[in-house]
Image (cartoon, rainbow, N blue to C red):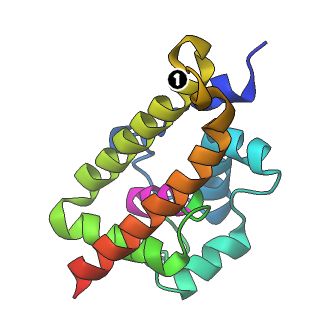
Amino acid sequence: MKTISQEILNFHCPRWNELPDLDLYMDQLVSILEKNLIIFEELWGEKIITSMMINNYVKQKVVDPPIKKRYNREHLAYFFVVCIMKRVLSISEISDLISYLTSLHSIDYAYNLYCDELERAIKEVFATTLDPRKMKGPDKELIILRSAVLAFANKMYFQVGIKNRLQ
């Protein structure tokens, strides 16, 4: 039986060409997001996305409004980023991140880059913690504490970097 850590280690964020290339209604959009992000829903013990959340992200202008009540591939890509990043970044920071990435690259390239980096980061963190031979001495005892303080340091680095980039 796989542990939740092993399931997270094997997480695959669908790439641009794996996203449906057709317009979706709200319930279809929610279903696709839930199906692909179920591991995080199980871990966090709460819904990863709801139609109310989607409406709020649109109202907050994080994501463009649907066209005739239908969402396209770009919307779906944005929602994948929002659903995952909302655990560590504020909604305005997520919006800044998306704006930053799409100012540098096309939406499809930026989204695929995000997926690649997300999976790389997950593998880097979870592969080390799953293999006790890679942890020695205080690493074994301090892994949880180090994870927390690194999360803090990385968030600060992001905030400084995005602030400097937007000025």
Count of numbered circles in the view: 1
Of residues 100 and 74, the one drawn nearer to the viewer in this rendering: 100
* Relative image position of residue 167 (x, y in whole percent): 22, 88
Residue 121 appears in which quarter of the rendering?
A: top left
- In this rendering, position of residue 97 left or right of residue 7: left
* Relative image position of residue 68 (x, y in whole percent): 50, 77
Which residue in the protein does label 1 denote? Answer: 127
Residue extending farthest to the right is: 45
Of residues 100 and 23, the one drawn nearer to the viewer in this rendering: 100
Q: Main secondary structure of the magenta part?
A: helix
- In this rendering, position of residue 112 left or right of residue 12: left
- Is residue 7 highlighted in magenta? no
Q: Residues within 10 Å of mark 1 (few under 14, many from 20)?
A: some
**Residue at (75%, 22%) from the top-left corner?**
3
Residue 144 appears in which quarter of the rendering?
A: top right
The magenta stretch is 72-82
Three-letter amino acid code at disc 1?
Ala
